[in-house]
């Protein structure tokens, strides 16, 4: 899959079947949309293109009006989204920075400049609650009328349901927010995972006796947070079992190097000798969050923190033994 920031690149498809959305989580509803998009693109002999926004439009308005509550909690980072879109078989993804210009574009300008001028849209697929353009004035009916007048097809995807429950990014956020990883996995159609490069931390893990693989979660408001039983993919043939902290580490000094940043820190229960004592830095891994143990705690000092992590490790081992040992 090719990825472009903005649509003014020579490589961007000049004729396309487009779907527009935020695709946070790339859940089963999104996956159904992408399958339909691919079919329509193939039939027309054009590229399948996802048009998505980063930052999320609601992040933009939250910042503009200084109302952080408006920003949606984030299921995945842009990296996770691009990986999932590639897996779904999309030809191109165009990431548009959502800014004042875009926010003030009328629906007709958006159609003319972005969809037709930028992407050469022959077919546009949107969700049933899709709104676009300044003040959210554009809807499916408007887009459909424009398609009729200007010669492109428009289709609307109805809500996708699993056991009567509408699959949506907010349903995934709610499941992750209450730590119900099984419900999140049902909505996503796969286990909930976070992927990224292993980065350097404070090297405090080794002092505490718990080395951790650190990944940045590149958004300040993750939909899930707390202590989780996990599997780490990408370091060895078999996934490694671990226990992880996703969040901002309230027990540690907030002014340090990663202060305030959201990190996913995973301690592997058994570290394979062939990786070497520090062989994971720079590698790309995927961490599968299986089960939530508890919320992040503000421990009183490093001894209490170490004891807390020891208990989490024991609880993770016990959980894995009764739930996962058959799988790996
Ligand atoms: C299983 C586990 C549970 C953790 N729980 C908490 C917690 O409840 N509160 C907190 O402030 N930090 C928690 N931490 C984060 C540790 O503070 C952090 O991983 C440790 O200081 C190592 O930092 P470093 O990787 O930068 O060296 C936890 C870490 C792990 C691995
Ligand atoms: N059991 C383990 N779990 C996770 N990482 C481990 C383990 N044993 C060794 N490592 C290695 O140690 C590194 C982390 O060491 P640590 O002291 O926690 O430093 P950092 O502050 O960079 O997280 C990891 O990136 C990995 O390469």
Image (cartoon, grey):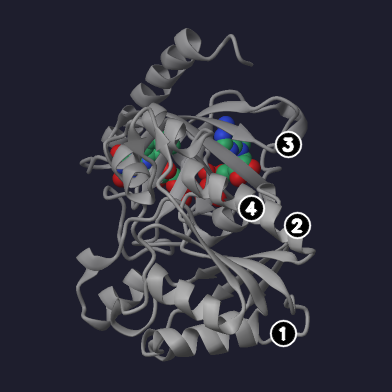
From the Cβ of disc 3, is ligand 2 less than 8 Å away?
Answer: yes
From the Cβ of disc 1, is ligand 2 less than 8 Å away?
Answer: no
State whether residue 98 appears in this view.
yes
Q: How far apart are marks 4 and 3 (CA)?
A: 28 Å
The answer to whether 11 appears left or right of 197 in the picture is right
Query: Which circle's residue, 4 or 2, is located before the other in the chain?
Result: 2
Q: Distance between the residues labelled 2 and 1?
A: 25 Å
Residue at image coords 61%, 74%: 152
**Which quadrant is the N terminus positioned in?**
bottom right
Relative to 186, does residue 3 appear above or below in the rendering?
below
The answer to whether 105 appears left or right of 3 in the picture is left
**Viewer-side residue, 184 vs 273:** 184
Tag 4 secondary structure = helix
Give the x, y percent position of residue 287: 55, 39
Mark 1 residue crowding within 10 angstroms, few (<14) / some (14–19) / many (20+): few
Q: How far apart are marks 4 and 1 (CA)?
A: 21 Å
Q: How far apart are marks 3 and 1 (CA)?
A: 43 Å
Give the x, y percent position of residue 308: 31, 30
Occupied quadrant, residue 121: bottom right
Dot 3 corresponds to which residue?
276
């Amino acid at each position: 899959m090719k990825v472009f920031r903005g649509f003014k690149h020579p490589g961007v498809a000049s004729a396309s079947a487009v779907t527009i959305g935020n695709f946070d989580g790339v859940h089963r509803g999104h996956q159904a949309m992408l399958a339909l998009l691919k079919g329509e693109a193939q039939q027309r002999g054009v590229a399948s293109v996802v048009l998505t926004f980063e930052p999320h439009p609601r992040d933009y308005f939250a910042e503009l009006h200084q109302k952080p509550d408006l920003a949606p909690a984030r299921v995945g980072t842009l990296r996770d989204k691009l990986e999932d879109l590639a897996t779904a078989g999309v030809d191109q993804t165009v990431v548009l920075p959502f800014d004042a210009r875009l926010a003030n574009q009328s629906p007709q300008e958006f159609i003319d400049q972005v969809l037709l001028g930028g992407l050469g849209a022959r077919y546009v697929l949107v969700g049933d609650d899709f709104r676009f353009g300044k003040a959210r004035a554009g809807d499916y009916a408007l887009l459909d009328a424009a398609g009729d007048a200007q010669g492109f097809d428009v289709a609307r995807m109805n809500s996708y349901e699993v056991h009567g429950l509408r699959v949506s990014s907010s349903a995934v956020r709610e499941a992750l927010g209450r730590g119900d990883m099984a419900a999140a996995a049902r909505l996503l159609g796969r286990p909930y995972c976070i992927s990224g490069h292993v980065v350097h931390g404070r090297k405090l893990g080794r002092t505490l006796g718990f080395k951790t693989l650190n990944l940045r979660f590149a958004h300040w408001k993750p939909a899930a947070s707390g202590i989780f039983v996990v599997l780490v993919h990408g370091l060895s043939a078999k996934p490694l079992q671990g226990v992880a902290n996703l969040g901002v580490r309230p027990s540690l000094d907030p002014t340090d190097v990663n202060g305030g940043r959201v990190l996913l820190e995973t301690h592997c229960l058994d570290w394979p000798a062939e990786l070497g004592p520090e062989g994971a830095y720079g590698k790309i891994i995927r961490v599968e969050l299986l089960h939530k143990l508890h919320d992040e705690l503000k421990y009183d000092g490093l001894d209490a923190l170490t004891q807390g992590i020891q208990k989490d490790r024991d609880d993770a081992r016990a959980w894995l033994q009764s739930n996962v040992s058959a799988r790996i």
